[in-house]
Amino acid sequence: MDLDETAKPHFADYARPLWSRRWLILVAVVVATGGVYVYYARQPKVYTSSTPVFVKDPGDPVSGVPSLQSTDRSVQNQAVLLYSRDIAASVAKKIRYEGTAEELLKRVSVTSREGEDFVNVTARGDTPQQAATIANAYAREFVTLVNTSQSARIKRALDLSKVQLRHVPPGPATQATRQTLGDQIRRLELALAVPPGLTKQIDPAVPPSEPSAPKPLRNALFAFVLSFLTAVAAAFGLERFDRRLKRPSDVHDVYGEPLLAVLPHSDDPAPMRGDTAILSPEFREAFRVLRTNIELARLDAPPRTIVVSSAVPGEGKSTVVRNLALAFRETGKSVAVVEADLRHPALGALFGATADVGLSEVLTHDAELGRVTVQVGAELPGLEELMRLDAAKPSAASAGTTRLTARSRPANGRAQARNGRAGAQKPPAGSLTLLLSGAKPANPPAVLASARAVEVLDELRSAHDVVLIDSAPLLAVTDTVPLLRYADGAIVVGRLGFTTRDTAKRLIEFLDRIPDAELLGIVANDLSQLDAAGFGYGYGYGGYGYGYGAEPEPPPKKVTQPV
C-alpha cells in the first residue's frame, strides 16, 4: 500500500467536501431558490411601455443654419424639463391619473443616446394599458414642449427683424438692407404660420403583453447560481476546519502506527445466509489483506490472541472482529470470538446468534464455558479442499502450542490454562466458536481483570488457533486495559470520515501508558466508493474482482445490526 501516493491530491479530495455536505448544499440551494421565487412571485406586477421621439434642432430661425450648440446637450436639457412637477401635473390631469404628480414622476424615465436624435420615453404602470397611456401622454407633452419652444424662437426672431426694419432709414443706400430684412420677415411669418413638426413621436406606446417586473424565474435562477456557489465555497471552508480523518494516509500519519488494511464501505457489512455467516464479497480481499498483515506482524511468533478495539463507539470494531474471524477460519484455522464489550454487545446481532448466558456468567462461575459457547455456521469457500490437503498435519492446539512471548503471561502469576479442561472444545469444520457477553456485570473492569478471565481466555486459546476479542472502546471506558496486557497484540479500528485527529492522538497517548500493550497496527474502516475510486483502491484489490475470479454469489439476506 503506497501511502505516499495516497498523500497526493486526488479527485476525491475535491469531490469529498461536496459529497459529504451534499445535503447542506441541497438545502441551501433549495431554500434560497424557492424563497426568492416565492417572494418575487407575490410582488405586485409592474408593466413597462416605451415610445421613441425624434428630436431635430431647426437651427437659427433667421439664417436656417443648424445651431453650433451640441444636439445631445440640447436634447438632454429638453428631456430634463419633463421631470418638473408642472409637466407631471399637466400629464396627470390629461390622463386622469388618480395619484399625485410626484408619484407619476416616479413612473417615468426619459433617456437619450449620445450621437442620436431620439429620446426614449418609458413608463411603468400597474396595468398594461396604464403603462402605455402614461408613456404616450409624456411623449406628446415632450413633443408639444419642444415644438412650442421652437415656435417661441421663431416669434422672437420675427419681432427682432421687424424692429431692425423700422430702424433702417429709407433711401437708395439702404435699399438692399430693407430688402433682406423684408425677405427674412416674410420667411419667419411663413414658418410661424406653419406649426413646426421636426420633433414628433415615431411609434406610439402599446400595452405590453407581460409584466416587466417582478421576474420570479429569472431572479430564482440567479439565486440558484449564487446560493450554489456560496454553498460550495462554504463546504470547502468547513472542510478546512474539519478534524476528521479522511484518507488512509491520514490514519497512518496521525496514529503513527502501521496501516494494516483499508476496508471499503458496505451497506451490508455482516450478511447472513440463513443461519450461516458469510463474508461480504466487497470485504473478502480486504480482510484477507488484514489477516495476512496480522500474521506478518511478527514472523517468528504470529499473534494468536488478538484484541480488537477502537477509540470511541461507532467506528466498526465489532464488524471487523466478525469478518476477520471468517477470514481466519477460511484458512483452516480454528477461531474463537469473545465478546468482551460487556456494556454494549453487538456480536450476537452480527452473527445472528443469541444466548441467555455468556462471558459474564462464566467469569462469575455461574456457568461453564463449554455450555455457553455457541457454534456459528460459517460459509468458507475452499475450506473442505484445504482441510483434505492438511489432514495429515497436526493443529497448533493438538501439538500443544504454548504462548509465544513472555509478555503474554501476566506478571502476577495468574493461573495457566490446563489442556483438556472441560468446555474448551475445538469447533467442527465450517464453524467458529462464539462466546457472547452475557448479562452486564456491575463492575466490568474488575471482572475482566480477574484471574478467572485469564483462565477462560487460556482455555479458549488452548483449543483454538486464533482467539479474537471484541473489546470496549478504549477512550470510553477502561474495560479493555487488562485485555491489552493479556493479548499477543491489539489492532485499533479507525473510521474514515468519523474518527477525529484529536481522538486518534489521545488514543495513542493512552496506549503508550499501558505496560505490555502491543499495538499491531491500525485498520482504516469505511472507505467510501468515491475515495476508493479517487485513491485507486478497488474493492477487488488490484482489479481481480470481488473473489479473484470466483463465481458471483447471490445477494445475501439483509439483517439489521450495528456496524
Image: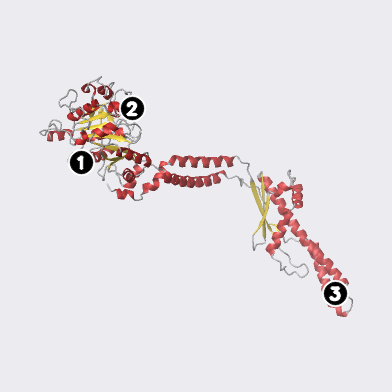
Question: Distance of mark 3 from mark 2, alpha carbons?
Answer: 125 Å
Secondary structure at badge 1 equals loop
Q: Is residue 315 above or below residue 232?
A: above
Instruction: Identify the amino acid type marked 1.
Output: Arg
When asked about the image quadrant of residue 439, the answer is: top left
Secondary structure at badge 2 equals loop
Q: Residues within 10 Å of mark 3 (few under 14, many from 20)?
A: some
Label number found at residue 178: 3
Here the colouring is secondary structure
Label number found at residue 110: none
Residues at marks 3 and 2 touching, judged by CB atoms closer than 8 Å: no
Nearer the viewer's eye, disc 3 or disc 1? 1
Q: Nearer the viewer, residue 434 or 405?
A: 405
Quadrant of the rendering where the C terminus is positioned: top left
Instruction: Identify the amino acid type marked 2.
Output: Arg
- Residue at the image position 71 percent from the left and 62 percent from the top: 74
Q: Residues within 10 Å of mark 1 (few under 14, many from 20)?
A: few
Nearer the viewer's eye, disc 3 or disc 2? 2
Instruction: Identify the amino acid type marked 3.
Output: Arg
- Residue at the image position 21 percent from the left and 22 percent from the top: 370
Question: Distance of mark 3 from mark 1, alpha carbons?
Answer: 130 Å
Residues at marks 2 and 1 touching, judged by CB atoms closer than 8 Å: no
Label number found at residue 298: 1
Name the residue tied to disc 2. Answer: 343
Question: Distance of mark 2 from mark 1, alpha carbons?
Answer: 32 Å
- Residue at the image position 41 percent from the left and 41 percent from the top: 20
User: Is residue 129 shown left or right of residue 187?
Assistant: left
Asked whether residue 55 is in view, the answer is no
Secondary structure at badge 3 equals helix
